[in-house]
Structures are given as C-alpha cells and as structure tokens.
Amino acid sequence: MSKNYCPEQQGSLDALCGVYAALNSIGLMTDRIDLSQLFTYIVDKLDCRLSVVIIHGLDTRELRKWVLKRCAAFCAKHQIEVTYSQCAKDLPLADHWRMMQQHHRLHGAGSIVLGLSGSYNHWVCVKSITEKTLIFVDTLPSRVYRRHVGRTDNSIQIRSKDTFLLRISSMI
C-alpha cells in the first residue's frame, strides 16, 4: 500500500449531491417518508440517466425535472403534498438572502435546496439561515458559510436561479 494513500470519502467519486440535498430536505420537513424507499424510487426513475448523474451531477433543470418532481410524486403516494418553486433569476445577494430567510421562517429547516458554484459545484439542503450565516445539512468541508458583502466564504457563489423553495403539507 502507498504511504501517501488518502482514502476516498463518500461523495468524492460521485456527483449525487442533488439527490441527497432533496432527500435531506424531505427528511427534515417530515418524518412520514421512508428516505431509503424514496432514494430507491428516484434511482429507479433515473434509469439510463443514472450513470450520467453519478459522474456529472445535475444542473438546475435536471434537479427540478428528475429529482424534485419525483420526490413530489413519491410523497403524494403517501398523502404528503410537496411543492417547490425556483427563485427568480439574478436577484442581488442581499435580496436573495432576505427571501431565503423569509421562506425559512415560514417553512422551516430543509425548505431550501441551494446550488453552490465557484471553486466547485454542489447542491445542499439548508438547515438554518441567519442574517450572516447559512448552515447546511449536507457533508461538506465546512457546513457553515458566512455571508460577506456580495460573496460567501471559500469563493462560493450563491445564485438565486439555483435555489428551490419547498413547501410540504399533509393531503389528509
């Protein structure tokens, strides 16, 4: 074995962060969905696209069409309504941040799935948001990102067009 070998970690060889961000979102918003069954459902529905998603990940359109839409369909079968909307494009960071804070206050942890871009691209589930801090559920080198004027730490960009706002309610 190489003396310099560094073991791979979950996620270092795959690009399933969009799937996990959606699963974590649903899991934080309700305890009535079996996430392992939801994961299986999404993977089955990806079918021939699965290898592309594993290797290349999901863009905003693909996350909406291939994952969030499927999450909503699966939850509906369990009498839970999941709705989602994509944020307006090109909001200034201050306006985007306020909009995310307001949505989080109304709908709670997990109600925001956010695309990060910059030094790397990654989908995350927002656990909480304050005036200056985002806390993510997902595994990252750091789960906390602090807002600075016009940017976030670690050369990460947060764009409103890569933000999904989720809502959940019982159909019963």
Image: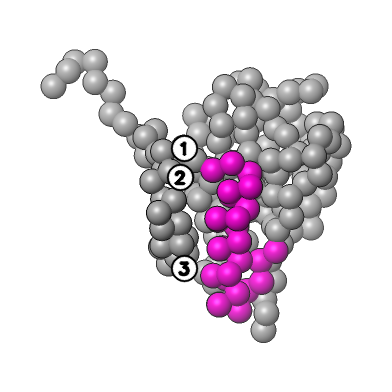
Which span is picked out in magenta? 58-83
Q: At 77% across and 46% down in the image, what residue appears? A: 87
For label 2, the SS is helix
Instruction: Say which of 41 and 135 sits in front.
Output: 41
For label 1, the SS is helix
Q: Is residue 103 above or below residue 150?
A: below
Amino acid type shown at disc 2: Val
Q: Quadrant of residue 90?
A: top right
Relative placement, left or right, of 109 versus 5 is: right
Q: At 50% across and 34% down in the image, what residue appears? A: 140
Instruction: Say which of 96 and 27 sits in front.
Output: 96
Q: Residue 160: x percent and y percent? A: 75, 39
Q: Which residue is mark 1?
A: 56
Relative placement, left or right, of 76 versus 40 is: right
Q: Which residue is mark 2?
A: 53
Q: Residue 93: x percent and y percent? A: 80, 31
Mark positioned earlier in the residue sequence (3 or 1): 3
Mark closer to the observer (3, 2):
2
Main SS, magenta residues: helix
Instruction: Say which of 10 and 137 sits in front.
Output: 10
Q: State yes or no: residue 80 in magenta.
A: yes
How packed is label 1: few (under 14 Cα within 10 Å), some, or many (20 or more)?
Answer: few
Q: Quadrant of residue 166?
A: bottom right
Q: Is residue 102 above or below residue 135?
A: below
Amino acid type shown at disc 3: Asp
Q: Which residue is mark 3?
A: 34
